[in-house]
Image: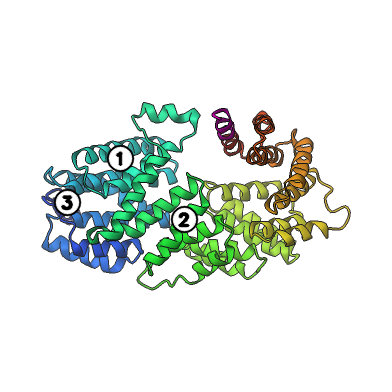
Amino acid sequence: MRRTLLIGILICCSQLVTATTFDFNKECREHYQEIFNLQFQKAEKFIATQKASQPVNAAVFYLEQQILFYKAFISEEDADFLKFRSEFDLRHDAYNSVPGGNPWAGYATSEMYLQSAILKLKRKEYLTAGYQLRKSYKIAVSNQEKFPAFIPNLKTLGFFHAVIGAVPDNYVWLANLAGMHGTIKQGASELTKLVEAAKTDNDLHFLLAESYFLRIFIASHFEKDPELAMKLTDELVAQISDYGPLGAFIIANTCISKGLFDRALTTLQQVKATSQQYPLFYLDYLTGILKLNKLQLDAQKDFQRFLDGFKGNSFVKAAHQKIGWIHLLQKDTTGYRQALAVALKKGNDFTDEDKQAVKEAQTGIIPNIYLLRSRLYFDGGNYASSLTELAGAPAGSFNRLQDQLEYTYRLARIFDKKGQKTKALHYYGQTYENGSSTTYYFAANAALLSAIIYEEQKKNKEAIEWYKKCLALRNHEYQNSIDQKAEAGLNRLNAK
C-alpha cells in the first residue's frame, strides 16, 4: 500500500515538473470562464484528459490552480486549503520549467503566490502571507518588464498598485521597505486598460468578467466612488449576461453601497445555481441581511440555509446573531438568548460582523427593540420608518446610557442621510458630549461624521476641529477604523 502511494506521488510530481510549454489555447480560455462562474465539473474533466494527453502543458495545471483556490477560499475547509498548499511547490516547479520566452509562466507563478497569501490571511497566518505577497509583487513586476505587451499582467499589477496606494500613511514605510510601490490611480488605470482590452480582443475576452470584478472593487473600496462603481456595474451587466455567483456578489454589493437595496435583493434572488455550480452560500447570508433590513422575518430561512450549507467559519456568528434578532422581533427572548449562545460557540471572529455578534452575546443585554427596528430600517435605506420607530417609542424606553447614546446617534444618522445637516450636527454633538468618556463607538463616529459634514460645507476650520476631537477619544470600539478615516480627513485638509 505504501509503495503504491509513493509511486502515485512520483507520477504526480513527474507530470507537474516536466511541463515544457504553457499553451493557454482557446479551450483553456473557455474553461477558465467556466471556472470563474464556479462551474468546475466540465473544467475538471478537461483537466483530467489533458493531463493524460498533454502532460507537458502547464496551462492545464494553471486551470486546476484556479479551481483549488476558489474551493479553498469559498469553503474555508481545511482539506481544500491543504490541497492547495500541498501542490504549491509542484505547480511552482511546473511553471519554472517552461522556457523563458513564455509570459504565462511568470503570470501564473505570481498569481499563485497572491492566491496563497490571500488564503493565509484568512487563516491569520500573517507572516508567511506578507512574504508571499511581496514575492507575488516582485514576480509580477519582473514579468511586466520582460513582457510589457502582455496585457494579462495588468490584472495582478493593477490590483497590487491599488492596494499599496490604499495603505494608511503611517504604514507606507512598511510597503516601501518591502520594495512595493503604487498608487490607487495607477492601479485603477491599469485595470481600466485591461477591461477595455478584454472587450475588444477575443483572446482576452475570458478575462472580461474578472477584470470588471476587480475594477469595480477598486472603485468602491479604494477610490470611494460609488457613482463610478455603479456605472461599471451597469456596464458589466450589459456586457455579460451570464455573470455567475461571483458577478451577482459584486453587483449586489455595489447596489447596496448606492442604496439600491431592492435591486441588490433582486440580483441575488435571480442567481440560478445549478448542480454543476460550486455553491457560494454567502449569497444566502447576504439575501438574509437585505430581507431583515426590510423586517421580512422569513430571512431566517436564508440565514439557516447559509448555516446548513457553509462548512467554514466566517459570518457564522453573525448569522446566529441575526436569527436571534428575528426571534427578538417576534418577542421571543428565549429564542434570542439561545441563538446568541450558539454564536459564542460556533464560527470565528475574523470579520467585523462576527466581532459585533460576539460582543453582543458577551454582554448578555437584550437589545432595545425600538433601536433595533430603527437600525434595521436605516441599514435598508428606509429612513422614514427608521425615524418613526424612534418617535413612536414610549417614554422611558431609553433608560440605559448605551441606549441614550444610540438614540441621539441614530437620529443624527437619519437626519444626515435625509440631508438635514443642521439637525444632524445637533444630535451628533449631543452624542459626542454624552458619550466621550465611554468605550462605545457612538461619540467617536459622531465626531468623525460631524467633521465630514463640515468638510463638505467647505468649513475647514470646524472640520479640522472635529477630526481632532475624534482622534482624541481613546479605547473605544472600532478604534483603528475610525482613526484611519479621521487621519485621512486631516491629511486632505492640510493639503489644501
Residue occupied by mark 1: 136
> Which amino acid lies under the numbered mark 2 shown in the image of this protein?
Gly
Tell me where residue 399 appears, x and y as whole percent: 84, 48
> Which amino acid lies under the numbered mark 3 shown in the image of this protein?
Leu
Q: Earlier in the sequence, mark 3 or mark 1?
A: 3
Residue 193 sits above or below residue 180 on the image? below
Quarter of the N terminus within the rendering: bottom left
Which contiguous range is marked in magenta?
A: 487-496
> Which amino acid lies under the numbered mark 1 shown in the image of this protein?
Ser
Q: Is residue 1 left or right of residue 336?
A: left
User: Marks 3 and 1, how far apart in space?
Assistant: 20 Å
Q: Earlier in the sequence, mark 3 or mark 2?
A: 3
Residue 402, visible in the rendered structure: no
Residue occupied by mark 2: 312
Instruction: Please name which of the two marks, 3 or 1, marks the residue nearer to the observer.
Output: 1
Residue in view at x 54 percent, y 61 percent: 286
Q: Give the label on residue 16, or none.
A: 3
